[in-house]
Image: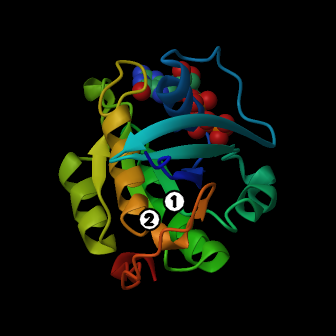
Amino acid sequence: MALPASLTVKLVMAGDSSVGKTCILTRYTDNCLPSYMSTVGIDFKTKAVEIDDTTLKLQIWDTAGQERFHTLSVSYFRGAQGFVLVYDITNTVSFENIALWMKDIKTKSGEDVEVVLLGNKCDKEDERQVSKERGEKLAWECGIPFFETSAKDNINIDKAFLILSEAIYSKRSSLLTDHNVVNLREPKKKLSCLTCI
Ligand SMILES: Nc1nc2c(ncn2[C@@H]2O[C@H](COP(=O)(O)OP(=O)(O)OP(=O)(O)O)[C@@H](O)[C@H]2O)c(=O)[nH]1
């Protein structure tokens, strides 16, 4: 029996400080929440997902959203196949800054990347500043999937990473493989986002 292919995938968490990037990542990889400490510099976690007969080894980089780490954070965008782009539904500025993050993604890693947009902290309905419709509209304009999530209550976290992994897997000709190179010669999709240009 042939060994299943194993693909290494680089993902990057991006978005303003305090939107919940580290919590989303820790919820996904360890099913818990970290004790709060703003990310300083860069860290990564790994998780394996199975799609068809293939193991995707996700290497997920957690960048710091604070402005003083911006140059360092975006330097890790290069070579990423996917981005988890996060805003906080209780923070309008973090939503408005999504356009700037999209611009950074395009500039630093090219247009042929997959992005999922997350409106995090949906458990805090009473503090909501950004409607779900605004999130959906922005994601539609950017041509990317969108979920409202809660790292706290574990809402839509696995689903968001799965959608992103599946989108990357469907273009697996561009990935590194451990056993063999799978080349499907799929046409490249342009990451277009009218709002973000
Ligand atoms: N209610 C609620 N709080 C959350 C959620 N996700 C994160 N938080 C809280 O938001 C704060 C910031 O979370 P982090 O995960 O550190 O945010 P970050 O985006 O990694 O921030 P930087 O490291 O500064 O870029 C912490 O106090 C978390 O407990 C969530 O889904 N719901």
Residue 20 in sight from this viewpoint = no
Identify the residue position indicated by label 2 in the image: 114
Q: Quadrant of residue 162?
A: top left
Residue 8 in sight from this viewpoint = yes
Depth check: 153 or 5 in front? 5
Q: What colouring method underlies this structural image?
A: rainbow
Mark 2 element type? strand
Q: Which residue is drawn at 71% across and 46% down?
A: 66
Mark 1 element type? strand
Q: Reply above or below: 44 against 140.
A: above
Residue 130: percent from left, percent from top = 30, 47
Which quadrant holds the N terminus? top left
Inspect the image, locate mark 2, and give the three-letter code of the amino acid beneath it.
Glu
Depth check: 79 or 16 in front? 79
Residue 85: percent from left, percent from top = 48, 53
Q: Quadrant of residue 135?
A: bottom left
Where in the image, quadrant-wise, is ligand 1 located?
A: top right
Identify the residue position indicated by label 1 in the image: 82
Residue 39: percent from left, percent from top = 73, 35
Cα–Cα gap, marks 2 and 1: 5 Å
Left or right of residue 186, residue 134 in this image: left
Residue 76: percent from left, percent from top = 73, 59
Q: Which residue is drawn at 47% across and 29% down?
A: 28
Is ligand 1 less than 8 Å from the beta carbon at label 1?
Answer: no
Q: In which quarter of the image is residue 169?
A: bottom left
Q: Reply above or below: 196 against 149.
A: below
Residues tagged 2 and 1 counted as in contact (Cβ below 8 A): yes
Inspect the image, locate mark 1, and give the three-letter code of the amino acid beneath it.
Gly
Left or right of residue 58, residue 149 in this image: left
Depth check: 91 or 108 in front? 108
Q: Reply above or below: 80 against 42.
A: below
